[in-house]
Image (cartoon, helix red, strand yellow):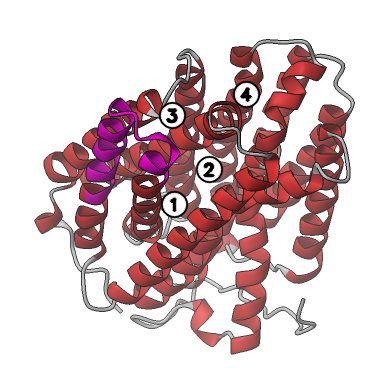
Amino acid sequence: MTSTAPLDLTLSASDEPAPHRHPGDALSARQRLSYVLILGALTALGPFTMDTYLPSLPTLQVDLNTTTSLTQLTLTATTVGFGIGQLLVGPWSDRVGRRLPLILATSLHIVACLGAALAPNVEVLSVFRFLQGFGAAAGGVVAQAMVRDLFGGRPLVRMLSNLALVNGLAPVIAPVVGSQLLLIMPWRGIFWVLAAYGAFVVSCVALWIVETRPKSARGHSVHSTTRARYKAVLTDRIYIGIVLVGSMNFAGLFAYLSASTFLFQDLYSFSAQQYGLLFAVNSVGIIIGVQTAGRLSHRIGPQWILAWSTAVMLAASVVIVINSAAGLGEWGVMVPLWFFICACGFGFPTVGVLTMNSHPHEAGTAASLLGAFQFVLAGVVAPIVGLFHLTSGLPMGAIMVVTSTLSVLGLWLVVRPRTVPDIGH
């Protein structure tokens, strides 16, 4: 981590930035890098909490003598906790500032990791997984809000693209990390590692992250109450539509995440390490999507990038269903799946920009609602996938078709791309 001292970004009421001027514009290149690294680590905390233990699910199921559905319920508990946590932490950070919610919630995450590592059965594990998700909620939502505090226009696109790269890579890298950890430790050891990661992140926040939301902004006359902030975002048609699109895209990705360990390890006989390699290959698609979307956004409106990416996701999911029904095996699933995940990568930064750009006064609330809907829907999808006997990729692909269809409809019927204003500079 760079040793550059943090920059005091607090603005007084009479020191508002000039038009198209934001506090983050004064950051040096090294200071921006510091914020990218620390906020990126915060953003990754949630996905790593949820997905690092995915390769251990079959072992966990045997060790705790439980069923597949109850095993996947531990994943659902985490996503629901993450969603509820965001609903509370986001508006709280708008009211009291960013640092306090970050430090307290992440500390809860550390304690919950230790509880999960010692859980005697799947029921207790599910409780601590819920608390893990709740505690990790601050990372993603507050990191996005802090970026919106600091930047606007095209710089906001660049910074959110950096966070989106981390947010997109984390769910696919986490199982790779988990599969390697299983070579040297039992599944409980993964939670000890997550506790250490949480401790590292909260230490970085305490040492390097300054308050980005000044007291004057917390008392803004129009957005001074939680009710006013929720009203501002919930009456914004474009925001609601983008939340729908982003949530459905994430639910489709989560259908893959929750089904993949059983589909590829049990049905297609992948080892934990081969399964991790599959995620590593898919992570290349995420990188391509996020980085390309960030560059295209300088010339093309993010809503149009989203229009193409949602269409590709729908087409790829249909191909998965067709190939699975035709009995084409793992390659019939893996190839279109890569394109589906790549298209998800295109959507991550565009969804972030379109939800955050128009709501600078309630950035925490805007980020929290987006994250909450994404993870609650993902939590609903996980046990649905578990209800099916996975003899092929057909159930997973069918759920992806449904989520992608709803995403396309939400974009064209609710958002209506031609009505989205320019994001500015």
How packed mark 2 is, by other alpha carbons closer than 10 Å (few <14, some 14-19, many 20 or more), is: many
- Residues at marks 3 and 4, CA–CA distance in whole angstroms: 12 Å
Determine which residue is flagged by label 2. Answer: 91
Q: Amino acid at mark 1?
A: Glu
- Residues at marks 2 and 1, CA–CA distance in whole angstroms: 8 Å
Q: Position of residue 142 (x, y in %)?
A: 58, 53
Disc 2 and disc 1 in contact, CB within 8 angstroms: yes
Rendered position, 380 above or below 257: above
Identify the mark nearer the N-term, 2 or 1: 2
Give whichever of 59, 134 is nearer the camera: 59
Determine which residue is flagged by label 3. Answer: 377
The local secondary structure at tag 1 comes to loop
Residue at image position (38%, 63%) is 289
Residue at image position (49%, 54%) is 282
Identify the mark nearer the N-term, 3 or 1: 1
Determine which residue is flagged by label 1. Answer: 362
Q: Magenta region: which residues?
A: 312-334
The local secondary structure at tag 4 comes to helix
- Which quarter of the rendering shows the N terminus? bottom right
- Which quarter of the rendering shows the C terminus? bottom left
Residue at image position (9%, 57%) is 418
Q: Amino acid at mark 3?
A: Leu
Identify the mark nearer the N-term, 3 or 4: 4
How packed mark 4 is, by other alpha carbons closer than 10 Å (few <14, some 14-19, many 20 or more), is: many
Left or right: residue 354 compared with residue 379: left
Give whichever of 241, 261 is nearer the camera: 261
Identify the mark nearer the N-term, 2 or 3: 2
Determine which residue is flagged by label 4. Answer: 77
The local secondary structure at tag 3 comes to helix
Disc 4 and disc 2 in contact, CB within 8 angstroms: no
